């Protein structure tokens, strides 16, 4: 079973618009990570947010974490066609380091 | 090497044959993961090697699946008597065995069972 569930499953926007993806999880976590996947191959790490952090920024990416609601969001601002990809959240539990991934959000940015 | 390397990149096999998939993690990474991804789906956890501790095999879907990691480095995922439902991309990742670390992924092996 998956720890994280992304919402929406698919998102289509125009270039320049912002894209927001959400992730919910079930158990306590040490940290939550967001990854990007192009063309169904290897995933690339985007950003990590620790359980004691509420918000983090990296370039055009903004991640929030609400541990009381067991949810996180990834915001991509001023989207570009090159941002078209699948985005996954992954959680690492307190008890160990194993990463569990959600089902992903497929983002399409139209030029 | 500079990144996680997986081989082969693509594998087509006949139903009932055995296959071996290889993963070379980043040097020094003590944690190694195997995941499976069907077309358009999320990542399904298979097995997790964590340093010298016993691996977490709880994700292996059947006893036809096994994996080993020799010398704390290279890992091999073996699927015996392959079935068509085994067709998927098999992804390997490695990381440092710490609480707050990112995982580095290989490009995967696309397995097609015909």
Image (spheres, coloured by chain):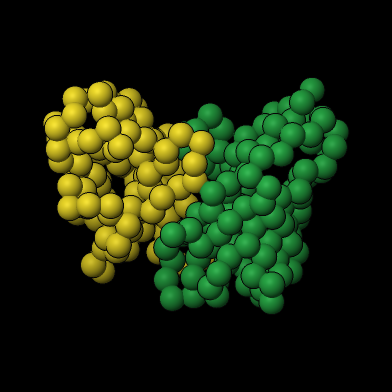
Chain colours: A green, B yellow
Q: Is residue B109 left or right of residue A10?
A: left
Residue in the image at 34% along x and 49% along y: B34
Q: Is residue B42 left or right of residue A21?
A: left
Q: Position of residue A20 (x, y in %)?
A: 76, 48
Quarter of the image where the N terminus of chain A is located: bottom left
Residue in the image at 62% along x and 53% along y: A6
Residue B6 can be seen in this image: no
Q: Position of residue A61 (x, y in %)?
A: 74, 48
Q: Is residue B32 left or right of residue B79?
A: right
Quarter of the image where the C terminus of chain A is located: top right
Residue B96 can be seen in this image: yes
Residue in the image at 55% along x and 59% along y: A4
Q: Position of residue B84 (x, y in %)?
A: 27, 32
Q: Quadrant of residue A36?
A: top right
Residue in the image at 23% along x and 35% along y: B83
Q: Which of the pair B58/B32 is nearer the observer?
A: B58
Q: Quadrant of residue A72?
A: bottom right
Q: Is residue B11 above or below residue B85?
A: above
Q: Position of residue A26 (x, y in %)?
A: 55, 69
Q: Is residue B18 left or right of residue A62?
A: left
Q: Is residue A49 above or below residue B23?
A: below
Total tally of numbered discs in the picture = 0
Q: Quadrant of residue A9?
A: top right
Q: Which of the pair B87/A60 is nearer the observer?
A: B87
Q: Is residue B57 above or below residue B6?
A: below
């Amino acid at each position: 079973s998956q720890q994280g569930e992304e919402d929406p499953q698919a998102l289509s926007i125009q270039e320049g618009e912002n894209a927001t993806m959400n992730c919910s999880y079930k158990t306590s976590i040490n940290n939550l990570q967001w990854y990007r996947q192009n063309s169904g191959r290897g995933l690339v790490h985007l950003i990590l947010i620790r359980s004691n952090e509420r918000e983090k920024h990296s370039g055009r990416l903004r991640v929030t974490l609400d541990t009381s609601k067991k949810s996180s969001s990834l915001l991509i601002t001023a989207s570009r066609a090159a941002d078209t990809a699948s985005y996954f959240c992954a959680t690492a539990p307190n008890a160990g380091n194993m990463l569990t991934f959600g089902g992903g959000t497929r983002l399409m940015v139209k030029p | 090497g500079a990144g996680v390397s997986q081989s082969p990149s693509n594998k087509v096999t006949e139903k009932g044959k055995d296959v071996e998939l290889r993963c070379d993690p980043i040097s020094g990474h003590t944690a190694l993961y195997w995941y499976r991804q069907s077309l358009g789906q999320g990542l399904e956890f298979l097995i997790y090697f964590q340093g010298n501790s016993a691996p977490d095999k709880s994700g292996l879907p059947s006893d036809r699946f096994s994996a080993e990691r020799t010398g704390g480095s290279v890992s091999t995922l073996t699927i015996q008597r392959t079935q068509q439902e085994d067709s998927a991309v098999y992804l390997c990742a490695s990381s440092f065995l710490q609480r707050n670390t990112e995982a580095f992924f290989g490009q995967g092996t696309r397995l097609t069972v015909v």
